[in-house]
Image: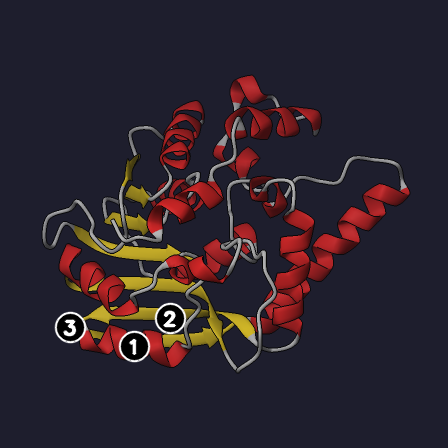
Amino acid sequence: MSTVEPGIARHYDVSGLEQHILAVLADTGVDVANLRASDLETVDEFHIGGIAATREVIGQMGLKPGTRLLDIGSGVGGPARFAANSAGVDVTGIDLTQSYVDIASSLSKRVGLADKTLFVQGSALEMPFGNASFDAAMILHVGMNLPDKRKLMSEAARVLKPGGVFAVYDLMRLKDGALTFPLPWASDGTMSFVATPDDYRSSATAAGFSVVAERPRGAFAVEFFATMRARMAAAQAEGKKPPPGVNLIMGENARTKIANLTAALEGGILAPVELILRLG
């Protein structure tokens, strides 16, 4: 484990998170005793664009039923459950934070997807899987916490079969400019490793991947947060509780983290970028 990893795991650890998620959903009228995967979509997709972004990424991977998919940095399991449900694939998720692994497993069980999803604790830079174990892999908003993109790409290449697709959807640096902390993935600069699309591309190529497609999603990201702010303001004006969203997993300073991220997005310093890579 690298020296930064324990701190990163702590950054994401929110105590009582599963019960909090269920309580918030129950508050909005969800029957939590008969939970469906779609009921969780507002709260278990911890990245810009939420379920819409996941759908777009997975839609470009050409997944078929029975495909073995690896989700690197699987969080509380939203994208893994979506892939299992929509594409009929068997998903293994790996995450640094043990509590996320436990919650992901528990939520999958609650929605009847325990047989299609498996979650394990571990590092993306040293994965506990054999060579050529998976047909496809994805990483959604995780690379910003990984100091070594070359190691990420070489590990992904190692565990994928030849011809395997690796979909990346990460926040990347598009131009110079200072970032203000805290951000959703980092309390301070010691745990933030935002890199440029070029860094990702050259690391991918060095590991034997070819770039199939690339798409910056900056405008999409700005619009996502504008919609989120509008929804929260509307709820406040009506004296209602704000609707649940990605902020739920961010803890009590969620508003500050989102404001700092929005400033970087609107300033064009950061943007989410999709990269679809193929091994070989």
What residue did someone put label 2 on? 275
Position of residue 209 in the picture relative to residue 233 (left or right): left
Report x, y in % for residue 166: 28, 63
Q: Secondary structure at mark 2?
A: strand
Mark positioned earlier in the residue sequence (2 or 3): 2
Marks 2,1: beta carbons within 8 A: yes
Q: Is residue 59 left or right of residue 232?
A: left
Q: Residue at x 54, y 72 (%)?
A: 270
Classify mark 3: residues with Cα within 10 Å, few (<14), some (14-19) or many (20+).
some
Location of mark 1 (residue): 211
The Cα atoms of the two marked residues, 2 and 1, are separated by 7 Å
- Give whichever of 26, 172 is nearer the camera: 172
Per the model, the C-alpha gap separating discs 2 and 3 is 15 Å
Q: Earlier in the sequence, mark 3 or mark 1?
A: 1
Up-down relation of residue 189 to residue 23 (above or below): below
Q: Amino acid at mark 1?
A: Val
Q: Quadrant of residue 202?
A: bottom left
Question: What numbered label is drawn on residue 137?
Answer: none
Report helix, strand or loop for mark 3: loop
**Amino acid, disc 3:** Gly
Q: Which residue is mark 3?
A: 280
Residue 128 appears in view: yes
Q: Position of residue 73 (x, y in %)?
A: 36, 49
The kind of residue on which mark 2 rests is Leu
